[in-house]
Amino acid sequence: MTTRLNQLLEHVLDGEPVIGDEIDEIFRRADRMRRRRLQALIGSGAAVVAVIAATGYALTVTLMPGADTSAPAPAASYAAARPSAVADPVLALIAPIADAKLRISPRPPERGSGWRQYSVTDSAGRPRGTIEVAVYHVAEDLCFPVLAAPGKCARTEWAPAGVEYVRYDDEKDPDWQVHQTIARHITDGRTVAVMATGERGADDAAGGKPGLTGAQVQKIATDRRLFDAFGSSEDCFGPSSGACPAFKVPVPDGSD
């Protein structure tokens, strides 16, 4: 009986640590179990975070269908789209008013202190004349000229923002048809002259017609933004007056 019992119990303790190391082995096994549980917990947490993030994204797309989730396209340069609008605020005012079939571009010599000059061409590239703009500082009340009566003052009309003006349109000469407006801001005396002329040497009156109508020239000249488009120190009565455009109807300097 004892021999049989010994045979049965012979392999019971196989794989178990020897008696001297059993305490250490117990702690090592416990440590391995803790690490496994910790790894499992971390894995579960990462999965939960991923699920929450995916759910939040889905809700955002569903509840805000207008939201643009794509990467933003590189911003186009405004200067490249409309180079003149940034560099030349005067041209930025003129271009939208002109006929869409016409192209307005700086005409050399294109600018100076107190003045700007532009060429007008049609869609085929044919010249349609010139647009000239100038600003003046007029200290006293301006006597707007009367073409038919030199020395007399013209009766002015009024535009919003305290701007008085007179139109001068002359289409009698087929070789130099002119639409001009002189306008003055009464609070500071700043005065502008805007003139559109047809291309000289045209075969007929239609070919020499200015690129802007008289009404368009008036609209540009009486726009308060045109006065602000020039620097505060710009003045065609100043040192650079000799370079300023020669208008059909000159702006009086107050000494006339």
Image (cartoon, rainbow, N blue to C red):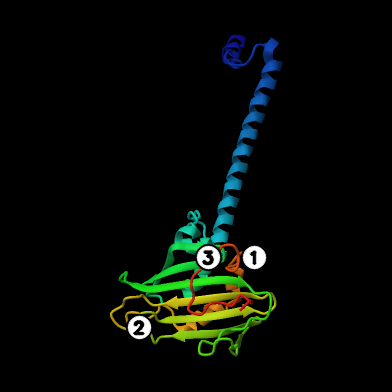
- Quarter occupied by residue 103: bottom left
| 3D distance between C-alphas at marks 3 and 1 | 19 Å
**Three-letter amino acid code of the residue under disc 1:** Ser
Tag 1's secondary structure? Answer: loop
Up the image or down, 217 lies above or below 154; here it is above
Q: Is residue 153 left or right of residue 209?
A: right
Q: Residue at point 46% right, 58% down? A: 80
Q: Which mark is residue 224?
A: none
Q: Is residue 105 left or right of residue 126?
A: right
Q: Quadrant of the C terminus?
A: bottom right
Tag 3's secondary structure? Answer: helix
**Three-letter amino acid code of the residue under disc 2:** Pro
Mark 3 or mark 1, earlier in chain = 1
| 3D distance between C-alphas at marks 3 and 2 | 28 Å
Q: Which mark is residue 232?
A: 1
- Quarter occupied by residue 156: bottom right
Mark 2 or mark 1, earlier in chain = 2
**Three-letter amino acid code of the residue under disc 3:** Gly
Q: Residues within 10 Å of mark 3 (few under 14, many from 20)?
A: few
Q: Look at mark 3 in the image and give the residue it sits on.
A: 242
Q: Quadrant of the N terminus?
A: top right
Is there any visible trace of residue 98 in the rendered image? no
Q: Look at mark 2 in the image and give the residue it sits on.
A: 174
Q: Residue at point 54% right, 90% down? A: 149
Q: Residues within 10 Å of mark 2 (few under 14, many from 20)?
A: many
| 3D distance between C-alphas at marks 2 and 1 | 37 Å
Q: Is residue 207 left or right of residue 233?
A: left
Up the image or down, 31 lies above or below 229; here it is above
Residue 195: give x, y in percent of width and height.
48, 77
Q: Residues within 10 Å of mark 1 (few under 14, many from 20)?
A: few
Q: Residue at point 61% right, 47% down? A: 49
Residue 94: give x, y in percent of width and height.
49, 73
